[in-house]
Amino acid sequence: MIDCPYCGAENIPGIDDCEECGQPLSHVHGGGASNEVERALIKDRVHVLAPKQPCMVSPDVTVGEVLHQMATNRIGCVMIVDGGKPVGIFSERDALMKLNTEAATLSDRPISEFMTANPETLQDSAKIAFAVQRMDLGGYRHLPIVSGDDQLQGIISVRAILNYLTDRMTSAR
């Protein structure tokens, strides 16, 4: 059986979409785990990574305020939320690609003009392997974690994944 990374429902190997929630399962097909680390990635859920409480701002907060928060708190991204739901993310990459040398002149503009809208999210019940796959395919360094009703619960980073993998490789020796 194959567990759906979205809803956890068991599905027959080889089907294209989860029978419970309809999400695509093409990314979970393939060979079985060949070692302890791979088995852990397939078995463990995102909540094991202890998602951190993200820095959150509303869409109308200024670019200057967001950049100040990122620098002061030494963080790589800020979540833009409306009613507790993520509507965007603003990361170091956004600062470089969208603001660049114009950051000072754009500092009074709302962050909503420069955020990455509708960020990919995962529920904390998703498997870590799926989080890794989603981060890899999207080129993300941060992934927001949401509840079943899309309320922002936390955020995981590449660093959390690397720490997890390091722990698993050390214990597998």
Image (spheres, helix red, strand yellow):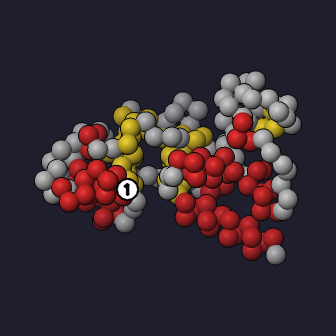
Disc 1 packing (10 Å; few <14; some 14–19; many ≥20): some
Quarter containing the C terminus: bottom right
| Count of all numbered marks drawn on residues in the image | 1
The kind of secondary structure element at disc 1 is helix
What residue is shown with label 1?
93
- Is residue 39 found left or right of 74 in the rendered image? right
The quadrant in which residue 72 appears is bottom left
Q: Amino acid at mark 1?
A: Arg
Residue 140 position within the rendered picture, expressed as x and y whole percent measured from the top left:
50, 52
Among all residues in the image, which is located at the extreme left? 105
The one nearer the camera, 67 or 149, is 67
Location of residue 148 with respect to 79 vertically, above or below: above
| Res 84 visible | no
Location of residue 57 with respect to 105 vertically, above or below: above
Location of residue 170 with respect to 13 vertically, above or below: below
The one nearer the camera, 25 or 70, is 25
The one nearer the camera, 8 or 147, is 8
Q: Residue at x 79, y 29 (%)?
A: 15
| Res 112 visible | yes
Residue 18 position within the rendered picture, expressed as x and y whole percent measured from the top left:
73, 28
The quadrant in which residue 101 appears is bottom left
The one nearer the camera, 131 or 13, is 13
